[in-house]
């Protein structure tokens, strides 16, 4: 079809979003479908009107479109394409028809415009970023979603400044990626907040300098602890779990006057956030949503990959396991049980 690219998937990493939709039994979930959206592939063929890539190019498919033509894609202020607005669960390419069928000819649904748990997939050119073929695919695939989201949130959405103080709520892969991004930006203090104290040692690999064990502080909320240890609150707070109550706690942990809270976690559909209008008015704080870390896929992902190749960005520590495609269930088990950060799934191993 016009604008589409057929790619052969080299490897794909497992994201919590895949697990979330795998477990989901009610709408917006739908079956049958092919999950997966963090991947690297090689271009096999291209449709009409595709000029950016040719056969043999190495590409990263990304759930967030980047048409390069609309006012939002041309602006430095946004990464939310208005020509192809992002949808959480479209389940089909933009023309409404599937590129997948089973042996009986029955339709199989897509996932996030990518569907990388397949040897081959078809992706719109707006959702593809060409990368340097010398970059290891098991590292490049990490920037399709989770790691980019965290690093980008510190770099682009927050604009973390050298010498600043950062607090990160939730130290899963995205929270650790925020720490890595804050480290790259030169933050002086990077405070991690989690219910699992073992995350502190893991977080140190990504620049974490201090740790708050959530729920273990006697008669004090996390925001009170952070406000005391920072002398007024953190400059930047990041909510990386997906809980409205935690967004409020992160907001309360920010310094009055200039504190900024960045929301990255995905909450349940319909969840509401409750903040006092007077608090917002009198505190001078800001609250910002961050989709894909505020990154523009086609321009910013290659920059991050170059920083990895220049040994500035730490991607290696995120890959804790690797399996062949035939063992994909093992990858799901590892992530579900909290035993891995990212498990890379190879198609040919």
Image (tube, rainbow, N blue to C red):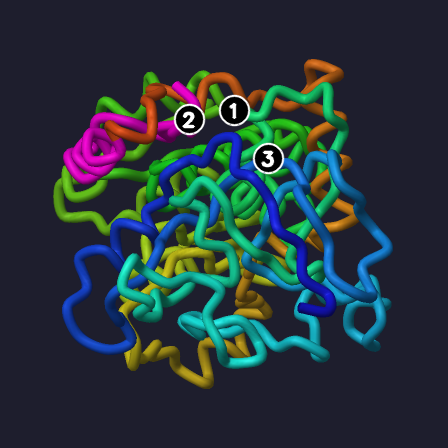
- The residue under the point 69% across, 34% down is 58
Depth check: 239 or 343 in front? 343
Q: CA distance from mark 2 to mark 1?
A: 8 Å
- Residue corresponding to mark 3: 182
Which of the two labelled residues, at mark 3 and mark 2, occupies the earlier sequence position?
Answer: 3
Q: Is residue 221 above or below residue 306?
A: below
- Residue corresponding to mark 2: 346
Q: Residues within 10 Å of mark 1 (few under 14, many from 20)?
A: many
The image shows residue 261 at horizontal and vertical percentages of 51, 58
Disc assigned to residue 138: 1
**On the rendered image, what quadrant is the C terminus found in?**
top left
Is the Cβ of the residue at disc 3 closer than 8 Å to that at disc 1?
Answer: no
Q: Which label sits in the foreground, 2 or 1?
A: 2
Tell me the SS state at disc 1: helix
Residue interval drawn in magenta: 328-349
Depth check: 71 or 333 in front? 333
Q: Which label sits in the foreground, 3 or 1?
A: 1
The image shows residue 21 at horizontal and vertical percentages of 27, 60
Is 202 left, or right, of 294 in this rendering?
Answer: left
**On the rendered image, what quadrant is the N terminus found in?**
bottom right
Tell me the SS state at disc 2: strand
């Amino acid at each position: 079809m016009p604008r589409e690219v057929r790619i052969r998937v080299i490897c794909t990493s497992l994201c919590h979003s895949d697990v979330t939709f795998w477990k989901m039994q009610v709408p917006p979930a739908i079956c049958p479908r092919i999950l997966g959206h963090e991947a690297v592939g090689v271009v096999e063929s291209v449709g009409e009107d595709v000029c950016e890539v040719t056969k043999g190019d190495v590409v990263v498919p990304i759930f967030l479109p980047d048409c390069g033509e609309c006012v939002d894609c041309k602006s430095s202020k946004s990464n939310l394409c208005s020509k192809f607005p992002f949808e959480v669960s479209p389940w089909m390419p933009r023309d409404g028809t599937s590129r997948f069928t089973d042996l009986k000819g029955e339709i199989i649904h897509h996932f996030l415009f990518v569907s990388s748990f397949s040897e081959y997939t078809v992706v719109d050119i707006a959702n593809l970023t060409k990368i340097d073929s010398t970059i290891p695919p098991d590292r490049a695939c990490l920037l399709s979603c989770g790691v980019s989201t965290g690093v980008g949130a510190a770099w682009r959405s927050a604009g973390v400044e050298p010498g600043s103080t950062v607090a990160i709520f939730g130290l899963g892969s995205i929270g650790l990626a925020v720490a890595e991004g804050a480290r790259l930006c030169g933050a002086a203090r990077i405070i991690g907040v989690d219910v699992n104290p073992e995350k502190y040692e893991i977080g140190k690999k990504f620049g974490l300098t201090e740790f708050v064990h959530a729920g273990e502080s006697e008669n004090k909320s996390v925001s009170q602890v952070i406000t005391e240890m920072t002398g007024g609150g953190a400059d930047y707070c990041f909510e990386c779990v997906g809980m409205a109550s935690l967004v409020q706690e992160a907001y309360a942990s920010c310094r009055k006057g200039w504190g900024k809270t960045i929301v990255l976690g995905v909450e349940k559909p319909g969840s509401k956030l409750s903040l006092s209008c007077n608090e917002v008015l009198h505190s001078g704080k800001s609250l910002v949503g961050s989709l894909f870390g505020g990154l523009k896929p086609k321009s910013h992902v290659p920059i991050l990959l170059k920083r990895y190749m220049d040994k500035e960005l730490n991607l290696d520590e995120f890959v804790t396991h690797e399996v062949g495609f035939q063992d994909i269930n093992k990858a799901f088990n590892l992530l579900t049980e909290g035993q891995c950060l990212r498990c890379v799934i190879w198609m040919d191993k």
